[in-house]
Image (spheres, rainbow, N blue to C red):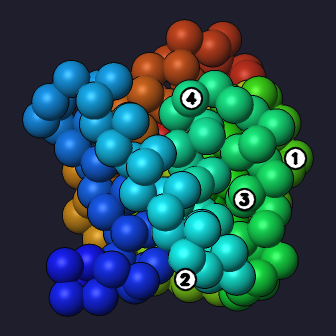
Amino acid sequence: AVTLDPGYAAAYALLADVQGLLMDLHHAPGRELLAQAEEYATKAVELDPALPDAQLSLAAVRQMQSRWTDAAAAYERAIALHPAFARAHRWYAGMQLQFRKYDETLEGFRKSLELDPYDIPSQSALGLALFYAGRPLEAAAHLQQLVARRDHLHAHFLLGQVYAQLASLPGENREDYRE
């Protein structure tokens, strides 16, 4: 797409996001992929600073670079440009979880799900956030409902972690979630 239209900002934003996926898959050295992601995200924002996807891609790059203030600003710009952008709310909530801002994190994941109730990554992320926020019973209940609705591998994995934590609590402080 960028070959056919070098001014197509959305394509550059997507290329930036793909670099992040390639990092997860260890496709190439992370430094190289992050440099490419930054190049693509920066180009997308230069071409169209009002494109929410471009701001979101830049936010993700800045987060991977540990440039927290810049990442937060780009997430907030993406959301301001498109308040119903569920993925932007989810990604920003994910960054807030890194800093144990549990109230903001839970609010962000819930907002994401309000906007897109079929977003399975937000569903499992909400379970993870509840777990990290020290609310394992709520996390277990949420993840059990998710697994019952959709057999999702990540939700099973998270539910196993929650069960392990619950098993370590004294009996009077937990409910029995075994079937």
Q: Are circles 4 and 3 on residues that touch, CB within 8 Å? A: no
Q: Amino acid at mark 4?
A: Gln
Q: Residue at x 33, y 24 (%)?
A: 31
Q: Which residue is mark 1?
A: 103
Which type of secondary structure does the marked residue at label 2 adopt?
Answer: loop
57 on left or right of 16: right
Which amino acid lies under the numbered mark 3 shown in the image of this protein?
Tyr
Question: Which residue, given by chain and number where applicable, does mark 4 sit on?
Answer: 65
Ranked by sequence position, the earlier of labels 2 and 1 is 1
Label 3 vs label 2, nearer the camera: 3
Q: Which residue is nearer to you in this view: 176 or 148?
A: 148
- Relative image position of residue 164 (x, y in whole percent): 44, 21
Question: Which residue is tagged 3?
Answer: 75
Q: Nearer the viewer, mark 4 or mark 3?
A: 4
- Badge 1: how crowded within 10 Å, few (<14), some, or many (20+)? some
**Disc on the earlier residue, 4 or 3:** 4
Label 4 and label 1: CA atoms lie apart by 24 Å
Q: Of label 3 and label 2, which has the lower sequence position?
A: 3
Task: List x then y, in percent, for residue 161.
Answer: 43, 27
What separation in Å lies between label 3 and label 2 (alpha carbons)? 21 Å
Sequence order check, earlier mark of 2 and 4: 4
Viewer-nearest of discs 3 and 1: 3
Q: Looking at the image, tell me whether mark 3 or mark 1 is earlier in sequence order.
A: 3
Callout 2: 10 Å neighbours few (<14), some, many (20+)? few
**Can you identify the residue that label 2 sits on?**
117
As helix, strand or loop, the secondary structure at mark 3 comes to helix
